[in-house]
Amino acid sequence: MSPDFSSSSADSDSNTPEALTLQAEISYAHGQFATAIASCEQAILLEPTWAPAYVTLGNVRQAQGLLDAAIRSYTQALELDPNLPQAHANLGSMFYKQGLLEEAITCYRQALSLKPDFAEVYWNLAQALRKQGNEAEAQICEQKAVEYQPQLASANFLFNQGNKFAQSGKLDQAMKSWQNAIAIDPNLAEAYCQIGMILRYRGEPKQAISYFEKALELEPKLVPAHQHLCGIFRDSSNLAAARQAVNHYRQMCSDTDPIMTAIYSISTHQVSGLNQIAKDQFLQLESQLDQSFNRTTEIEIRSLYSNLLFSLPYLRDNITQNSRLIQTISQRYIEQILQANRSLYFLEYSQSSPQQHLKIGIISSHFNRHAVGWCSLDIIRALSKITPEIYLYFTDRPKVDDRTALFQQIARKLYEPKRYPNGLPEANEITQEIRQDEIDILLDLDAISMPIHTEILYTQPAPVCLSWLGFDAPYLSEKNYFLCDWHTHPKGHEQYYTEQLVRMPDSFVAVSGFERMAVNREQFRKAYRIGLDQVIYLSVAPGRKFNRELVEAQVAILKQVPNSILIHKAAGDVAVFQGAYQQACQAAGVSLHRVKFIPRFPTEEEHRQIYALADVLLDSYPYNGGTHTLEALWFEVPVVTRKGEQFLSRMGYSFLQGVGIEAGIAESWEEYINWGVRFGEDIALRKSVQTQLIQAKASTHLAPLWNPSLFAENLYKICGKLLSDR
């Protein structure tokens, strides 16, 4: 507790009660307790109703350790003058020392009613409230104490206070506390880091950078600052800076933080398009994991599950090896994170009366202009015509755009998280909302690409939990399901999964088409100085899907089709893309001028004009294109795709099967090159596939890939059966 509060006096005459009380206070301050007591008693003898003398006497008795005597003195003072805030405050401190929290709190509140800016009392009240378990009000009182008297707080106190505010979602107050901590101690690296984290989560990455850089200037091995700085640059277009940041992170911390530095390096090199470096680092990390698992921390397990497993399908298409690694990491994640998290909200289902319509809940962070949003809207809209009970739940801070309104129009509810502890939403809040809505079927659109989904799914907030579309299965529970089709998951693939596989009869997705800005093919080609008779191959593989084997195959096709060029248009490091094609072209004897790089467009509608240039889309592998391949097929562009083993290596194959086309499906790079060459040389073959694609959109015999209404009908029937079988 803070020091006791002194009474005041105003008279220098040594024979007055005021002067004697002042003398007592001076003696008390110098530890001359006997002299102080004598002065107080003399003042009381002169004026028995002089309350300040009793307050000072109480202070002396407290200093002597005579708490009961001190309480009597303060009580006598208040009987004489109940408007003494110092007496109420000091009496409260005596009760606090005796463990009488209610009495102490009552006294402190009375003191504050008399003196609302009494900083020390706010501080002491906070301690009493915290002992009672009232953390929320304790934090408020501490904040008021520091506002009125900043010197009460140390830098460490303010830093910890900021952490508590952040954990309770009070981010503005957290930022203020950390800034105050820095004002006291400008070398507090962790405070700079915390401010940077909140700025990043709030969508202000540029402002965050300076705070992370300052934190690392003060503490070069501060791991969170390294990680967030890497993440900001990785998520931006400045990928050279991202690689520089991650290399610095590895240089400073790889000896003490080998797993996390490797994971960050793998991800950064992937986004840049340097997947060979990423793969080498992945294989090295994988070889070391068996020896490291017994020592992995919670942060490492979380990152292995959500980051490394997200990187995996871009690097290797071996379903046996991949599923073994996924199951090993997932089991650790379940044991160390999910089972150990006692705050996760579990509840038995109540038996509700049968409903006329299924209540379908959908969790995603992408009810907007995102690949998941583009590929799911038409199906969700079709579902809403079967059942009006559609509930959508944002699982991250919403990024609202014009597409969000379309989702809102077809849903009974579009829920946004209310709290963001440490800048992130809480799984429990969303889980409880789902349970309160009594959802029958919960569709998860993002799986491990959004780690919060795994916490939600693990608690099984609905009788049927079904992951779908945005990524592979989360490997969490045999009671849950993963929605796929027979092309992505042929017979026997059950052995590689934890979730039960639920196969759609035709395709795992369906859309009703895509819009694009009006474009004239001839004028568009002229604008890019492309001849009308040239064969145009298109690659839209972003950095994560870009690799040396893909480039070499594409250049091999160019070499065999002389009157052809390749257009590459994708997110990633353009310098890396150019360097890879230059190396492949030199090795194959192909002019680099036959590869054109087109920058990205601001909107998807503008981007889709690119398909007017293209004659053939060359799909990526081992992670096939998703939305881009669907777009190409919708705009009647033949596709060459390599079919692999894992789900994400079989999407292109599934899409082509969904429109009834066999041409263009390869099972090796050699077949991939052969199909590319055939499409380039054989205009009749291209025209034949284009005709098939046109016919597939005819309303009289609409292909399953373009029929979200049929998809929704089949999905609704499947969900009904899954629910009835529970």
Image (spheres, grey):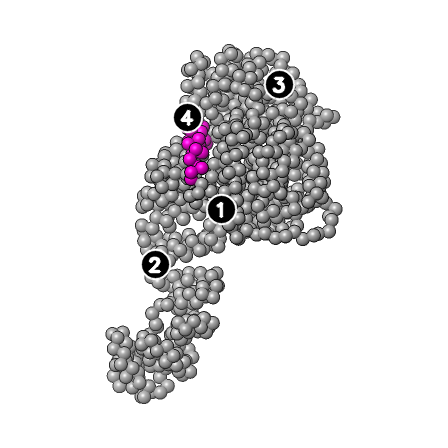
Residue indicated by mark 3: 663
Residue indicated by mark 4: 575
Assign a secondary structure to mark 3. loop
At label 3, counting other C-alpha atoms closer than 10 Å, the crowd grade (few under 14, some 14-19, many 20 or more) is some
Residue drawn 65% across the image and 16% down it: 688
Dot 3 and dot 4 residues touching (CB under 8 Å): no
Q: Position of residue 318 (x, y in %)?
A: 52, 28
The amino acid pointed to by label 1 is Gln
Q: Quadrant of the N terminus?
A: bottom left
Residue indicated by mark 1: 336
Of label 2 and label 1, which has the lower sequence position?
2
* Quadrant of residue 723 within the rendered picture: top right
Of label 2 and label 3, which has the lower sequence position?
2
Residue indicated by mark 2: 154
Q: CA distance from mark 3 to mark 4?
A: 33 Å
Q: Nearer the viewer, mark 2 or mark 3?
A: 3
Assign a secondary structure to mark 4. helix
Residue drawn 48% across the image and 26% down it: 546
State the extent of the magenta-drawn residues as a range. Answer: 269-292
